[in-house]
Image (tube, helix red, strand yellow):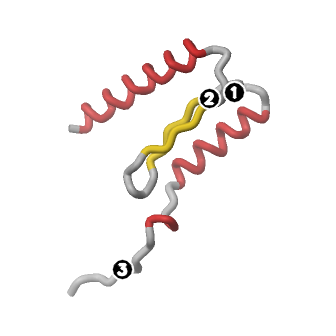
Amino acid sequence: MAEIKEFIPHSKRTNTEVIQLLEEWLVEAKNGEILECALVGVMPNNRSMTAATQANSVSALVGGMEILKARMLARHLSDL
């Protein structure tokens, strides 16, 4: 017999890893450790949402995004 599960609309789902990461970064920003940032989030409909602060260090932000991209791709490829 199939198990009946409660339907949870996308808008009510949470990812505790996302919340924890954002809370950690918020503490760092409030302590003056993060001065600029660029963010990407994936929404329930699989669309991406982006935002960035004004950048005095454009090269540092873009370079950091490239490092993150390489790490994410390497992790994804190792999972295949």
Secondary structure under tag 3 reads loop
**Amino acid bearing label 3:** Lys
The CA distance from mark 2 to mark 3 is 39 Å
Q: Where is the N terminus found, in terms of image quarters?
A: bottom left
Q: Residue at x 44, y 65 (%)?
A: 10
What whole-number distance in Å separates the C-alpha atoms at marks 2 and 1? 7 Å
Q: Nearer the viewer, residue 29 or 46?
A: 46
Q: Is residue 48 above or below residue 66?
A: below
Kindly report which numbered mark, 1 or 3, lies closer to the viewer in this rendering. 1
Where is residue 16? Give x, y as percent.
54, 54
Counting from the top left corner in percent of width and height, residue 80 is at: 20, 38
The quadrant in which residue 4 appears is bottom left
Q: Is 50 placed above or below 14 here?
A: above
Q: Secondary structure at mark 1?
A: loop
Task: Report whether 70 appears left or right of 80.
Answer: right
For label 2, the residue is 37
Q: Earlier in the sequence, mark 1 or mark 3?
A: 3
Q: Is disc 2 placed on a helix, strand or loop? A: loop
User: Is mark 2 in CB contact (under 8 Å) with mark 1?
Assistant: yes
Q: Mark 1 near mark 3, Cβ–Cβ under 8 Å? A: no
Kindly identify the residue that appears in the image at 43 percent across and 57 percent down: 44
Indicate left or right for 62 with 80 as reference. right
17 or 8: nearer the viewer:
8
For mark 2, does the 10 Å Cα neighbourhood hold few (<14), some (14 to 19), or many (20 or more) residues?
Answer: some
Question: Which residue in the structure is indicated by mark 1?
Answer: 34
Q: How many marks?
A: 3
Q: Name the amino acid type tagged 1.
A: Ile
Q: Amino acid at mark 2?
A: Cys
Q: Which circle marks residue 5 in the picture?
A: 3
**Position in image of residue 76 (x %, y %):** 29, 35
The alpha-carbon separation of the residues under discs 1 and 3 comes to 41 Å
